[in-house]
Image (spheres, rainbow, N blue to C red):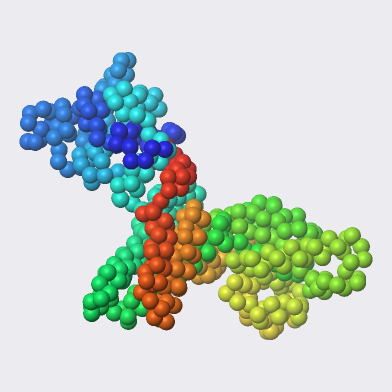
């Protein structure tokens, strides 16, 4: 991909599916030439600045605005009613003259318009080239460019919100703020080194320590966001667990809305964990149904547990289920209300934390006599039934609330986290080194050296320091027209 190209580019910016409107996007220094005689306005659209040239009134405008007019395509298509947004100066997305032609959502018309613009001197844009130009012009930084891709690829409301927050600058602003503070501190340090023989203090020791501490705190916070994203490269996981035949699989099927797990009165029917992705409160969630946990067979090394292939499989199932529980964002403990509560269930209820949601299953059946006032029942969040559907909506709401409260909502687009994690870690280590050197008064030269490393690392995150192959990797993932 050519970087910094100043030729005029054009692409279809609307989806290929049938829509009410098709959009052709153009950017570059020759936008007016490409559109001259192609898009014309009516006499009613002329204004004083048009100097009487009604058909090309838009060419004389000094500010961005919407124009109603006609696109003149070659025969047999002829004149097509259309609208156009025209940016005459650097206040466009790409900081170049730019235009968007809005035509009826008919693919042959849109394709013909694209071909005509190319015939007049524009070339087809490459993947992500409009956003690349915005980045190179300083309109957005690299994290915001990746957020544009995140908006395009968002499959859920949660992913869209994450990308929009990043596009609005929730990562770009703290990175820019930290870089500006470090640039100022480094400038003062280097000025002091240049005038080391003069009795001039360009930055006080206390001020330097405060600046370094604040920047380190900002970088560590951003790195934590990246690490959360790294552990959540996919939907948050909700694991259903409990004793065999406690109603886990039935509840799993009910939440999925399909018969995903095999259900039977025979305990131990589920031997491996099953998974499914569902949408809860607009967010994608990964549900797991684990094998029934038998505390007696979880422990390793018991002779009776390794006597037959069948018990070996049971033991492996227990280990798999335990592993999934450890990694889960939320655990749903299923307790069968139609039987007495076991000692293991009571222990789980006592130890339940914010990552555990305890529910009473089979609420359509009569409660066991021992459960009246039973210890631990107060910890059950609600009763639900996969048969009658009672409590299922409340369970979905509780799952969404718990996931939101536990911070599983991602703040960083996945591609940004993958690219930037190492650079932020390098910036953190350099700032720690600079802070240690400053506190121990090891010399301003050493502090300045560490600050340069931190600035380069933060510059890599924002794209201020970039390599062509990195940009090529980022923007090649885009679709044409963006």
Q: In this view, does 239 lie to the left or right of 44?
A: right
Q: Residue at x 30, y 71 (%)?
A: 193
Q: Which of 3 and 341 is in front in this view?
A: 3
Give the residue furthest to the right: 307
Give the residue furthest to the front: 197
For the C terminus, the image quarter is top left
Image position of 400 with respect to 210: above or below: above
**Quadrant of res 196:** bottom left
User: Does any portion of residue 75 appear in the rendered image?
Assistant: yes
**Quadrant of res 85:** top left
For the N terminus, the image quarter is top left
Q: Is residue 405 left or right of residue 87?
A: right
Q: Residue at x 45, y 68 (%)?
A: 430
Q: Where is residue 329 in the image (x, y as percent from the top left)?
A: 59, 66
Q: Which residue is drawn at 62% across and 72% down?
A: 356
Q: Position of residue 352 (x, y in %)?
A: 63, 77
Q: Where is residue 261 in the image (x, y as percent from the top left)?
A: 72, 55
Q: Which of 343 and 477 is in front in this view?
A: 477
Q: Residue at x 46, y 48 (%)?
A: 470
Q: Is residue 75 left or right of residue 218?
A: left
User: Does any portion of residue 20 appear in the rendered image?
Assistant: no
């Amino acid at each position: 991909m050519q970087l910094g190209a100043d030729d005029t580019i054009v692409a279809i910016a609307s989806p290929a599916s049938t829509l009410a409107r098709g959009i052709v996007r153009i950017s570059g220094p020759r936008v007016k030439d490409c559109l001259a005689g192609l898009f014309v306005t009516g006499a009613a659209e002329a204004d004083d600045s048009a100097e009487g040239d009604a058909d090309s009134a838009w060419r004389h405008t000094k500010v961005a605005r919407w124009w109603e007019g006609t696109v003149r395509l070659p025969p047999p298509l002829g004149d097509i009613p259309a609208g156009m947004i025209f940016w005459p100066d650097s206040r466009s997305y790409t900081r170049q003259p730019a235009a968007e032609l809005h035509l009826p959502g008919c693919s042959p018309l849109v394709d013909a318009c694209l071909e005509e613009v190319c015939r007049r001197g524009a070339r087809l844009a490459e993947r992500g080239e409009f956003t690349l130009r915005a980045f190179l012009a300083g309109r957005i930084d690299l994290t915001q460019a990746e957020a544009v891709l995140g908006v395009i690829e968002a499959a859920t409301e949660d992913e869209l919100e994450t990308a929009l927050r990043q596009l609005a600058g929730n990562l770009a602003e703290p990175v820019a703020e930290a870089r500006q503070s470090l640039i100022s501190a480094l400038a003062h340090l280097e000025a002091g080194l240049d005038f080391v023989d003069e009795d001039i203090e360009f930055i006080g020791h206390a001020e330097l320590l405060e600046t370094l501490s604040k920047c380190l705190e900002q970088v560590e916070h951003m790195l934590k966001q990246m690490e959360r994203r790294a552990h959540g490269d996919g939907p948050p996981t909700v694991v259903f667990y409990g004793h065999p035949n406690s109603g886990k699989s039935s509840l799993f099927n009910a939440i999925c809305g399909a018969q995903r797990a095999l259900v039977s009165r025979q305990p131990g029917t589920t031997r491996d964990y099953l998974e499914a992705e569902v949408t809860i409160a607009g967010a994608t969630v990964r549900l797991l149904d684990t094998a029934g946990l038998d505390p007696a067979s979880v422990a390793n090394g018991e002779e009776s547990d390794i006597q037959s292939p069948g018990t070996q499989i049971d033991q492996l199932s227990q280990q798999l289920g335990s592993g999934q529980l450890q990694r889960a964002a939320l655990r749903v403990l299923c307790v069968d209300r139609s039987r007495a509560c076991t000692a293991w269930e009571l222990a789980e209820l006592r130890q339940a934390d914010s990552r555990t949601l305890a529910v009473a299953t089979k609420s359509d059946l009569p409660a066991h006599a021992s459960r009246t006032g039973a210890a631990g029942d107060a910890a059950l969040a609600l009763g639900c039934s996969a048969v009658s559907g009672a409590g299922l909506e409340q369970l979905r709401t509780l799952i969404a609330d718990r996931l939101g409260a536990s911070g599983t909502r991602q703040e960083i687009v996945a591609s940004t986290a993958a690219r930037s994690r190492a650079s932020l870690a390098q910036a953190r280590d350099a700032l720690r080194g600079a802070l240690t050197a400053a506190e121990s008064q090891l010399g301003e030269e050493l502090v300045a050296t560490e600050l340069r490393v931190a600035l380069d690392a933060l510059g890599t995150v924002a794209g201020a320091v970039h390599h062509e192959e990195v940009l090529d990797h980022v923007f090649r993932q885009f679709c044409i027209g963006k």
